[in-house]
Image (spheres, rainbow, N blue to C red):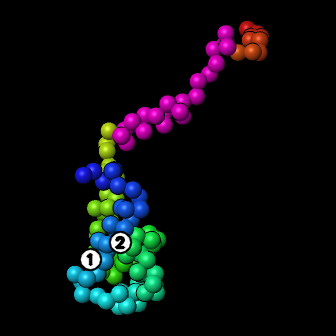
Amino acid sequence: MSIYANTDAFIARELGSRLDRLRLDSGWTRAELAAEVGVSVPTLRRLMRGQGSIITVIAVLRALGRLDEVDNFVPAPTFSPIKAFQEYEKSLRKARVRKPSREQSDSPPPDIDW
């Protein structure tokens, strides 16, 4: 089943449930984890039901020693040399200043005395 078939609320509850499983596997009680994270037990309980803030999720992962899971959750963008070169060329095109041709100029040509 595709994750896209689930509602946001379902996915949030699933994430909370997985965090709770990590807590249990790490041997922490809710009270211990809440104290380590710096939140109340009811706040932690709400998080485990999928009703928490991203800051609390990060704090829980840090306390459980699983902060590296953030890279799996939202991978860091990779560097693309081709994309960097394309952006560089684009910036050069924007930086180029072209003088208007005489046909495009609104002012009369200057008088030249030889």
Left or right, 92 with reference to 5: right
The amino acid at mark 1 is Arg
SS of the residue under disc 2: helix
Q: Which residue is drawn at 28% across and 74% down?
A: 66
17 w.r.t. 73: above or below: below
Name the residue nearer the viewer: 4 or 36. 4
35 w.r.t. 23: above or below: below
Q: Residue at x 29, y 88 (%)?
A: 28
Q: What is the quadrant of residue 87 in the picture? A: top left
Q: Does label 2 or label 1 sit earlier along the sequence?
A: 2
Q: Residue at x 35, y 87 (%)?
A: 30
Residue 62 in the image, given as x and y percentages of width and height: 34, 78
Q: Is residue 94 magenta?
A: yes
Residue 64 in the image, given as x and y percentages of width and height: 30, 80
Q: Which residue is drawn at 39% across and 56% down?
A: 7
Q: Which segment is the magenta one?
A: 83-104
Q: Which mark is residue 21?
A: 1
Q: Is residue 73 visible?
A: yes
Residue 34 in the image, given as x and y percentages of width and height: 40, 86
Query: What residue would you read off at disc 2?
Result: 16
Q: Is residue 110 visible?
A: no
The amino acid at mark 2 is Gly
Q: How crowded is mark 1: few (under 14 residues within 10 Å), some or many (20 or more)?
A: few
Left or right, 77 with reference to 97: left
Residue 91 in the image, given as x and y percentages of width and height: 48, 37
Assess whether mark 1 and mark 2 are in contact (beta carbons under 8 angstroms). Answer: no
Q: Is residue 102 magenta?
A: yes
Name the residue nearer the viewer: 64 or 85. 64
SS of the residue under disc 1: helix
Name the residue nearer the viewer: 16 or 60. 16
